[in-house]
């Protein structure tokens, strides 16, 4: 099952003055003497007048959750599926090829040997939700293979709670698992708990993923001679968080090999809290861990604390990474005969209150090139990988005849619609009300949807930057009101017309300077991922806004009408901002321009007729 969408509702009520769209058109016409742009009108709720009143009544009664599937479909929202029933304790070998979202609770429990294969499972999906709770629990020699699982999907929510607990032998192989997923959210809670001689292999796991979280809580707790290999784990990812909490706690003879873990990644956050605590004879190896990464952060708290005969090897750990910070607190304290080696270990590490005996440091803070700093090495690599060509450019590029690359401006978020105010204002919108929001939208604890909502709420609740005015809006009326409150009553909204020209070279055609090319201010609005359409809008001072004909350089035919904004004051921007990596400068030294991407928008003061 995939995420539910809708939006066909209004066709039977064309011309009905009580639909949300008709209401917004009247609201717009009272304030502005122009037609509502089609791209903005398409985002207004598609609910019929009857459905709008019905769902509004449920919202006021605090019972909208009882009709969530219908609400999500009719209002064109982003909702996770309630998983269909699982296959209980299936005894046979099964191959799942191109299968949909399901719940596999107790699947494979007590299985004697055999093998299950999940190949191309939910491949190329939009929102993938699966539960493998108690999968292969108490099995004997059972093998599980997850190959090309959920690859190239948008949002992935996977639950492996108590997976393989009390299993004897067998293995789990995760190959190309969740590769190139936009927002992976994976939970391995009590995974392989109390298992014996069962190994897991994570190869190309969440490679090239973007944001999201992966949590290993009580993973392998009380395990007996269990070995795991993380090869190519989270390589090339952007801002993916991994947590290993109480991992291998009180286990015997366990060990992990982290090879090329988070290699070439950007802003990874990995936490090892109570990892290997009170273990016996464990062997861990970190080779090329977060090598050549950017802004790496990996706190090791109480790692192998109170363990016996534990051996850990950090080889080329964080070598050549750019910035970042590693903290080893209580590392190896109370351990008996530990052996820990740091060979060619990266920079910016802090060791607090760690065991002094059995710890060796060799070639600490070694860089990839002895003639360059680690930051210079990493910067050279990340300019190309994390700053797409054409994403940022200088203002002098906006002239007729210029040939330049255009980045991928396609909107990668799920399609959603605004809510009518009569519904929106009866829903909570606060991180302090996350429990109520989870109830309304059927979000489980630590689920992707819970994290998605919290991320959006926290960003909306963040204090504005100096000189910034900001607001998150979930209705078309609120969007117009905020722009008018900042710019005045005479406003116009603009966006790039389509996605033609993305990821290819383009030629700049005719240029039109908004407000005569004068320095002005604008209101920029960017989407936030949330169940309904939500925009983060903020004032942007000291800008110039342009419209440009986008031409195919081969035919010189117009293929798009692009909107670009040039920020003239970048003094408050971070030195690590992608614009400076791409353009080779620093805060306040240059202006920075970029295109308005699909479904984003910028509001400006309207030009006089």
Image: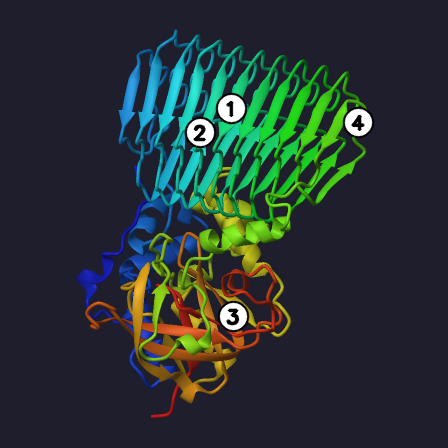
Checking the image for residue 355, the label placed there is 4
Q: Quick one: label 3 or label 1, which is nearer the N terminus?
A: 1
> Which residue is found at the position 64% from the left and 71% from the top?
466
The Cα atoms of the two marked residues, 4 and 3, are separated by 49 Å
The Cα atoms of the two marked residues, 1 and 2, are separated by 8 Å
Residue that badge 3 annotates:
538
The Cα atoms of the two marked residues, 3 and 1, are separated by 45 Å
Image quarter for residue 396?
Answer: bottom left
Residue 556 location in percent, x, y? 22, 73
Residue 448 location in percent, x, y? 47, 42
Asked if the residue under mark 2 is in contact with the one under mark 1, i.e. CB atoms within 8 Å, the reply is yes
Q: Quick one: label 2 or label 4, which is nearer the N terminus?
A: 2
The Cα atoms of the two marked residues, 3 and 2, are separated by 41 Å
> Which residue is found at the position 50% from the left and 22% from the top?
162
Residue 131 location in percent, x, y? 41, 29
Residue that badge 2 annotates:
203
> Which residue is found at the position 64% from the left and 45% from the top?
370
Rendered position, 511 above or below 208: below
- As helix, strand or loop, the secondary structure at mark 4 comes to loop
Q: Quick one: label 4 or label 3, which is nearer the N terminus?
A: 4
Asked if the residue under mark 2 is in contact with the one under mark 3, i.e. CB atoms within 8 Å, the reply is no
Residue that badge 1 annotates:
229
Foreground of the two, 153 or 369: 369
Neighbor class of circle 3 (other Cα within 10 Å; few <14, some 14-19, many 20+) is: many
- As helix, strand or loop, the secondary structure at mark 1 comes to strand
Horizontally, residue 289 falls left or right of residue 102, namely right
């Amino acid at each position: 099952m995939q995420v539910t969408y809708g939006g066909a509702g209004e066709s039977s009520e064309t011309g009905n003055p009580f639909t949300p769209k008709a209401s917004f058109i009247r609201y717009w016409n009272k304030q502005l003497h122009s037609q509502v742009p089609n791209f903005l009108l398409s985002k207004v709720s598609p609910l019929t007048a009857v459905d709008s009143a019905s769902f509004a009544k449920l919202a006021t009664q605090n019972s909208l959750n009882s009709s969530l599937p219908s609400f999500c479909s009719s209002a064109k929202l982003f909702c996770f599926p309630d998983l269909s029933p699982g296959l209980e304790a299936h005894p046979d070998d099964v191959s799942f090829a191109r299968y949909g979202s399901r719940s596999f609770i107790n699947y494979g429990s007590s299985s004697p040997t055999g093998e299950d294969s999940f190949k191309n499972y939910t491949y190329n999906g939009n929102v993938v939700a699966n539960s493998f709770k108690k999968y292969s629990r108490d099995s004997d020699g059972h093998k599980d293979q997850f190959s090309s699982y959920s690859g190239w999907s948008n949002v992935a929510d996977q639950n492996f709670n108590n997976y393989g607990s009390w299993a004897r032998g067998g293995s789990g192989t995760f190959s190309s698992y969740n590769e190139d997923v936009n927002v992976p959210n994976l939970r391995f809670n009590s995974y392989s708990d109390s298992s014996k001689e069962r190994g897991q292999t994570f190869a190309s796991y969440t490679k090239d993923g973007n944001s999201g979280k992966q949590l290993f809580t009580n993973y392998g707790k009380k395990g007996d001679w269990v070995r795991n290999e993380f090869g190519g784990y989270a390589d090339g990812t952007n801002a993916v968080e991994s947590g290993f909490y109480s991992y291998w706690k009180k286990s015997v003879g366990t060990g992990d090999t982290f090879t090329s873990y988070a290699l070439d990644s950007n802003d990874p956050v990995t936490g090892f809290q109570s990892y290997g605590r009170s273990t016996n004879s464990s062997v861990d190896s970190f080779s090329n861990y977060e090598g050549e990464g950017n802004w790496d952060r990996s706190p090791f708290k109480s790692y192998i604390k109170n363990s016996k005969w534990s051996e850990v090897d950090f080889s080329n750990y964080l070598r050549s990474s750019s910035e970042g910070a590693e903290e080893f607190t209580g590392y190896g304290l109370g351990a008996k005969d530990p052996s820990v080696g740091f060979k060619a270990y990266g920079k910016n590490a802090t060791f607090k209150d760690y065991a002094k005996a059995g710890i060796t440091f060799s070639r600490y803070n070694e860089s990839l090139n002895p003639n360059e700093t680690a930051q210079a090495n990493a910067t050279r690599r990340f300019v190309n990988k994390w700053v797409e060509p054409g994403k940022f450019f200088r203002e002098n590029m906006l002239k007729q005849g210029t040939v330049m690359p255009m980045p991928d401006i396609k909107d990668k978020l799920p399609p959603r619609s605004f809510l009518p105010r009569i519904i929106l204002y009866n829903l909570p919108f606060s991180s302090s009300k996350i429990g109520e929001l989870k109830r309304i939208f059927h979000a489980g604890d630590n689920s992707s949807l819970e994290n998605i909502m919290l991320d959006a709420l926290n960003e909306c609740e963040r204090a504005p930057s100096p000189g910034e005015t900001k607001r998150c809006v979930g209705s078309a009326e609120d969007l117009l009101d905020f722009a008018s409150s900042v710019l005045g009553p005479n406003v116009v909204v603009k966006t790039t017309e389509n996605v033609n020209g993305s990821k290819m070279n383009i030629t700049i055609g005719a240029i039109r300077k908004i407000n005569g090319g004068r320095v002005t201010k604008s209101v920029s609005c960017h989407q936030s991922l949330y169940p309904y359409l939500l925009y983060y809008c903020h004032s942007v001072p000291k800008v110039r806004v342009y419209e440009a004909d986008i031409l195919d350089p081969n035919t010189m035919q117009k293929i798009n009408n692009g909107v670009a904004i040039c920020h003239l004051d970048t003094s408050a921007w971070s030195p690590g901002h992608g614009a400076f990596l791409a353009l080779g400068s620093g805060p306040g030294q240059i202006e920075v321009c970029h295109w308005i991407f699909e479904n984003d928008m910028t509001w400006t003061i309207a030009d006089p007729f």
